[in-house]
Image (cartoon, rainbow, N blue to C red):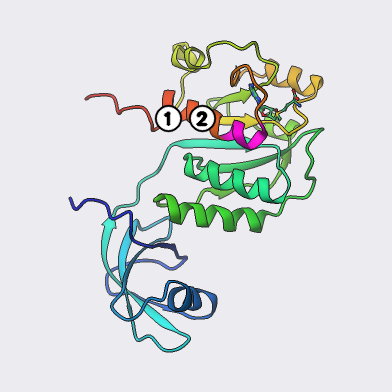
Amino acid sequence: VTAYDFAATRLFVEEPLGTGMRLEQRGDRANFLLNVLRLRDGAELLVFNGRDGEWRVRLAETTRKTTVLVVERQERAQAAGPDIDYCFAPLKHARLDYMVQKAVEMGAARLRPVITRRTQATRVNLARMRANAVEAAEQCGILAVPEIVAETSLDTLLAAWEADRLLVVCDEDAPAGDAASVLASLPAGRTSERLALLVGPEGGFDPAERARLLAHPAVLRLSLGPRILRADTAAVAGLTLLQAFLGDWKTPATA
Ligand code: SAM
């Protein structure tokens, strides 16, 4: 197998992908290829659409404002990443952009904005979140763009919770235990391939929310250490622990 070419430019496309297909590029996308990346006929890049795997394509028939991506060969078959929902109280603009990109790089399969009582941002720009998710997916080498779910209230989220999905709640009020051992020593009945992480707003969970969370059967309370982390820091710290102990950072079990 050829070593994976991480250096190649990767683009997310909506079209189906197969050998010989021609993806006509015009407008912003053509401008990006021709004037930002300054690619010309013969240049190669990788494209993926979340369904057909990753394909190598080559520019052809380039004009001043258009080009064609000719699909040559499949580099990687479509494969699913870890089944992780990243649930979070949305932050304002730049911090939310950052948080979305980090959640994608850390392997979240779904992003679920959750409106809690102290959430700062009441309106969530789902299109902006998706644009950030596409950019992060292109950069970090994954084969699908994580799903951006429309925001819900915390109560709605919990009421519809899938019984077999472990919900790890990053709780700044949790006794500073050994975060690693909490995740490493889950009783058999609690481990699951279906995971989720919840990070609260900059103002934290209110006592009534915390009580509802801790009473929920799918919830596992997790401390992220003795310091108070900003919500976007907690996102990376929480997803790191999840991936390291329960997700795809674990060395695959030897057969
Ligand atoms: N208002 C809270 C306070 O000052 O105590 C801080 C909330 S913190 C800025 C935002 C979110 O990050 C929290 O709701 C929690 O989900 C997570 N978080 C931050 N520090 C944490 C810690 N030490 N342990 C667990 N979760 C933490």
Exactly how many numbered labels are in the figure? 2
Which residue was labeled with disc 1? Answer: 247
User: Nearer the N terminus, badge 2 or badge 1?
Assistant: 2
Kind of residue at badge 1: Gly
Q: Is residue 205 above or below residue 35?
A: above
Q: Is residue 32 magenta?
A: no
> Can the viewer see residue 161 in this picture?
no
Q: Is residue 67 above or below residue 1?
A: below
Question: Which residue is depicted at the point 31% across and 27% down?
Answer: 251
- Quadrant containing the C terminus is top left
- Magenta-colored span: 230-235
Q: Residue furthest left?
A: 1
Element marked by disc 2: strand
x and y percent of residue 54 in the render?
34, 58
x and y percent of residue 108 in the render?
51, 40
Residue neighbourhood size for the residue with mark 2, other residues' Cα within 10 Å, grouped as few (<14), some (14–19), many (≥20)? many
Which residue was labeled with disc 2? Answer: 195
